[in-house]
Image (cartoon, rainbow, N blue to C red):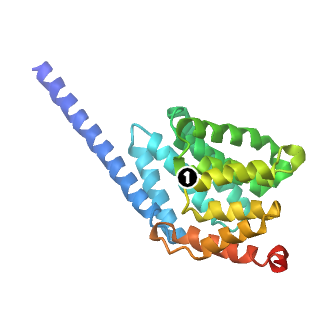
Amino acid sequence: MKGGIFCFLFLIMGISMLLFSQGAGELIAQGDALFFEMEDMATARKALDLYRRALALSDDKYGAYWRMARIHYFIGVHTEDKKEKKTVFSQGAYYAKKAVSRGPERPDGHYWLGVNNGKVGETRGVLKSLSLVKPIKRAMNKVLELDHTYEDGGADRVLGRVYFKLPGIAGGSKDKSKEHLERSKDLGPEDPVTRVYLAETYLALKEIEKARAELEYVLNMDPDPRWCISLEEAKQDARELLKEKEFRKE
């Protein structure tokens, strides 16, 4: 009789764990659907809530952790208050570290750790954030090692931007920036952010026509319902860059 009771209890526990797992998976799927149709901050916060609920339910928290890092990055980018931005990106880095600890040989945690740390650095200012450069490079080089195509060449995009932003005395290099960003563009030719970054690097290297071509490509890109906000922001950046005096001289 006791054996039967124990079997019954184990069966109930097994079913409960399965239901919790399915619930977490469904919540993550719903959050992903919102993320890839992102139109505003309200949508982002709904996705954040879904991922947070999935994290509470999930036994294997890796997927929820790196998605929490990703959504914090998006929210931080679109937060106006500088102090709040830093807090949001720091939270994103926290969740990314959790993901790395659970999946050290998977790219997601490393990537979102690097990009959130990069944005923490931007809010502080370059010279106050030099201590973050090595961790960011380390994270992105790990992504390149694990899956260089991740996020359409995202690791090369980040490294390209790091080399562009850093002063030469701190290891910055416009040539290295160009190398990484061109590689990123090859992997993700329809990523408008990569093209805007590459245009800025070309402009710094006095390759004016190449810069113009990248910016005009962005301005002529068709709307993509998956990346409404990113594309519109990239187009606005492209318009602003085309006002630079270097373009007016041509």
Q: Position of residue 34 (x, y in %)?
A: 43, 63
Q: Nearer the viewer, residue 162 or 87?
A: 162
Query: Which residue is at 57% across, 50% downward?
Result: 153
Query: Which residue is at 76% across, 57% downward?
Result: 123
Q: Position of residue 132 (x, y in %)?
A: 75, 43
The number of numbered discs placed on residues in the rendered structure image is: 1
Q: Mark 1 is on which residue type?
A: Leu
Few, some or many residues within 10 Å of mark 1 (<14, 14–19, 20+): some
Q: Nearer the viewer, residue 206 or 165?
A: 206
Quadrant, the C terminus: bottom right
Quadrant, the N terminus: top left
> Element at badge 1?
helix
Q: Position of residue 162 (x, y in %)?
A: 74, 50
Q: Position of residue 46 (x, y in %)?
A: 46, 63
Query: Which residue is at 45% across, 67% downward?
Result: 37
Q: Is residue 116 visible?
A: no
25 vs 140, left or right, is left
242 vs 249, left or right, is left
67 vs 82, left or right, is left
Q: Is residue 61 visible?
A: yes
Note whether 162 is above or below 211 in the view shown.
above
Query: Extreme left residue here?
Result: 1
Q: Nearer the viewer, residue 3 or 143?
A: 143
Query: Which residue is at 84% across, 49% downward?
Result: 128
Q: Nearer the viewer, residue 125 or 42?
A: 125
Query: Which quadrant of the structure image shows residue 240?
Result: bottom right
Note whether 122 is above or below 130 in the view shown.
below
- The residue where tag 1 is placed is 187
